[in-house]
Amino acid sequence: MDANNGGITGSIDLSPRGSDEVIDLTGHVHHLPCCVKFTGTSSVSHYFKPRNTGVEVDGLIVEEAFFRGRKLQGTTVSMPETYAGFVLGKKNPGKGKAQKILGKGEAFESEWNSNSWEMLAKCRNMTFWNHDSLPSQDDASMRSFHWFAVSKALHEPVSAEDLASAPFSQEQN
């Protein structure tokens, strides 16, 4: 941690590198209710097979899958139109593209001293899983999507009509 400002700075590069095509992981990004302590390739699609249950709860279509014998119930959520999800990897200054994601090699964190990140893949939706309950609009992961509306309200330009109809007076002291 930097003693001068109490934080860490870094950079994230979201531009495609050279002739590399950006990998689209739409439909393949899952947020599991567990920690998997493994980095490397695995035939996940051979074992992890989500399926639609035909059930709808809180306007969410429920999916079902099993992970290490435990039943998971989840839902796939699309990103709002002007948003995207990104898979980031730490840049290795000497080797070009980050090496640790998507089975393209192993990462050696001790060799990477910079705090620079780059986009390795993108997605337009994510599937969030629960292991003890049905997915709902009250899940923490679903509530995080409410911030998109807050962000839009904060950053959208205000028109003269909006200001004129505001319930406060600009002449207050």
Image: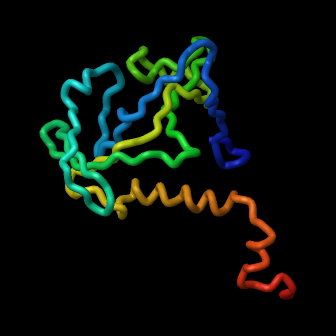
Q: Residue 170, percent across and down?
A: 83, 82
Instruction: Out of 45 and 1, give the one closest to the viewer.
Output: 45
The residue lying furthest to the left in this view is 69
Quadrant the C terminus occupies: bottom right
Q: Residue 92, percent across and down?
A: 58, 19
Q: Residue at x 20, y 24 (%)?
A: 46
Quadrant the N terminus occupies: top right
Q: Residue at x 28, y 52 (%)?
A: 61
Task: Decide: is 31 above or below 118.
Answer: below
Q: Residue 54, percent across and down?
A: 19, 50
Q: Residue 104, percent across and down?
A: 42, 15
Q: State the scheme by which the image is colored.
A: rainbow
| Residue 67, image quadrant | top left
Instruction: Out of 74 and 160, give the one closest to the viewer.
Output: 160
Q: Residue at x 57, y 12 (%)?
A: 95
**Along the horizontal axis of the image, is 50 left or right of 85?**
left
**Along the horizontal axis of the image, is 171 left or right of 54?**
right
| Residue 42, image quadrant | top left
Q: Residue at x 29, y 47 (%)?
A: 129
Instruction: Out of 26 and 29, give the one closest to the viewer.
Output: 26
